[in-house]
Amino acid sequence: MSLCEDSKFFNENLYIKIDKLISPEICNELIEKYEQFSFDNSIEVTSKKIIDECSDLISTKEINSILSKYFKSNYKIFWSSFDVVKSNALEDNYSTLWHLDGGSPKTLKLFIYLNPVSIHGGNTLIIDEYRTKVLRNADALPIEHKKRKLDLSSTLEKLKLDTITISYNYEAGCALLFSPLLLAHRCLPPKNNQKRYTICFTIVSAN
Ligand SMILES: [Fe+2]
């Protein structure tokens, strides 16, 4: 897709897969760096170094074009994190249940996958804006962690909506840019003791 088509697709759908944002070699280096945290270099310090390194890499023509057309103003990174999701994440990670994030409605998230879905089997599942609205009106996307659902298929069926979820086969260095306040989403944990490494940037209007 051209830059114009990317922006059009994003503004209509509020999600887009961005290919080859970071090279697989750099992704491997970042994962290795993360796994080498030590007493002198805590996870927090190591994560911050990795995020700083990545912040420069995400300022591409494609991303800048999509973000400037979406925000119609300046924008900034509000928050960032290095996330490692393990295969037992269903036990204690509420992001693995269907939800909407809180905050300003225009907030966006950029998830950079550092290792490929084909290896770990994890993913980010999303539901389009129309069905999300219907689900929210039916109180199927509660804020309370304990009321969140792992599977919305029967709720969608009752509401006479398609049960399909949107996901991509992310390779190392690919990213998902999406609206976490307007699209229902959940983290699908990796399989078979694999780990899913992602860097998440929360982007907001600078005004
Ligand atoms: Fe979320």
Image (cartoon, rainbow, N blue to C red):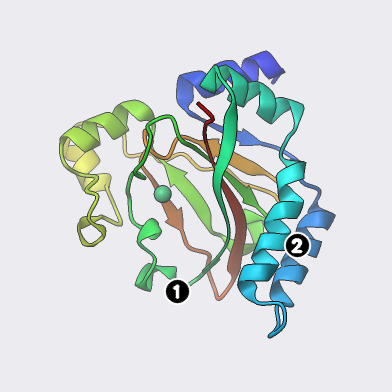
The picture places residue 69, in percent across and down from the top left corner, at: 58, 17
Residue 156 vs 29, above or below: the answer is: above
**Marks 1,2: beta carbons within 8 A:** no
Determine whether the beta carbon of the residue marked 1 sits less than 8 angstroms from the nearest atom of ligand 1.
no
Q: Position of residue 145 (x, y in %)?
A: 26, 59
The structure residue drawn at horizontal position 32% and vertical position 26%, both measured from the top left corner, is 130
Q: Which mark is residue 19?
A: none
Label disc, if present, on residue 30 of the rendered structure: 2
Q: Residues within 10 Å of mark 1 (few under 14, many from 20)?
A: some
* Residue type for callout 1: Asn
Determine which residue is flagged by label 1. Answer: 88
Q: Is residue 154 above or below residue 31?
A: above
Question: In the current view of this chain or complex, which residue is farthest to the front?
Answer: 207
**Observer-nearest residue: 187 or 169?**
187
Of circles 1 and 2, which is in front? 2
Q: Residue at x 70, y 70 (%)?
A: 34
Would residue 173 be seen by someone viewing this image from the given angle?
no
Q: Is residue 6 above or below residue 147?
A: above
